Amino acid sequence: MDNITHDTPQQTPRNGNGFAVASITLGIISFATMCVPWLMLVLALTGTTFGIISWVKATRTSTPPTLPIIGTIASGVATIVALIITTTFYLALDSINAQWGEEFSRMDSMFNSMRDSIDIWDNQFDYDQLPEADSTFFIK
């Protein structure tokens, strides 16, 4: 047989920027989810963690840490904004509860008494005494 050599493709070394790109992406996405504070906080903290991991990995392999730094900064800023928004949101809810809590409980007791009155009236009505519906009544 002939001596045939097959060229096997060489694998190129990977940069390992996956965590850095994920950090940048999560930082950007977390700003887009500003209307859901807890989701923004989770995404931003995850992005910050990925950014720090990629930064440490880049430092150990002596690759330029440009993407990890950008990802850490983007997610870090998103984390700070998320903490501010989340804290403000829950403080506002607490303030509303403090101001309107008594009013809400008074309205709740009023609605409960109305529901009880309807239940009492409903229990007094005998549905078996209703006449049978005549289908010819609706036909003209």
Image: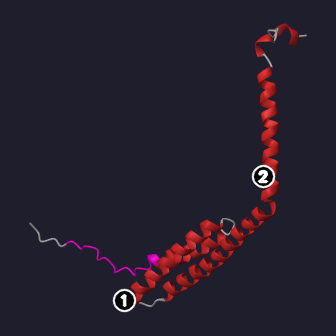
Report, in whole angstroms, how far the alpha carbon at label 1 lies from the one at label 2. 60 Å
In the rendered structure, which amino acid carries the disc numbered 1?
A: Arg
Q: How is the image coloured?
A: secondary structure
In the rendered structure, which amino acid carries the disc numbered 2?
A: Ser
* Residue 5 located left or right of residue 12: left
Residue stretch in magenta:
6-19
Q: Position of residue 99 (x, y in %)?
A: 81, 64
* Residue 7 located left or right of residue 96: left
Residue farthest right in this picture: 140
Closer to the camera in the image, 100 or 78: 100
Q: Is 14 colored magenta in this rendering?
A: yes
The residue located at (45%, 77%) in the rendering is 19
Q: Secondary structure at mark 2?
A: helix
Q: Position of residue 78 (x, y in %)?
A: 61, 78
The residue located at (63%, 76%) in the rendering is 83
Q: Quadrant of residue 60?
A: bottom left
Indicate which disc residue 87 carries: none
Q: Is 55 colored magenta in this rendering?
A: no
Q: Position of residue 73 (x, y in %)?
A: 57, 85
Q: Is residue 68 above or below residue 33?
A: below
Residue wearing tag 1: 60
The residue located at (49%, 84%) in the rendering is 68
Mark 1 vs mark 2: which is more N-terminal? 1
Q: Position of residue 112 (x, y in %)?
A: 78, 41
Q: Secondary structure at mark 1?
A: helix
Residue farthest left in this picture: 1
Quadrant of the image containing the C terminus: top right
Residue wearing tag 2: 105
Q: Main secondary structure of the magenta part?
A: loop
Q: Is residue 96 above or below residue 139?
A: below
Q: Residues within 10 Å of mark 2 (few under 14, many from 20)?
A: few
The residue located at (50%, 77%) in the rendering is 21
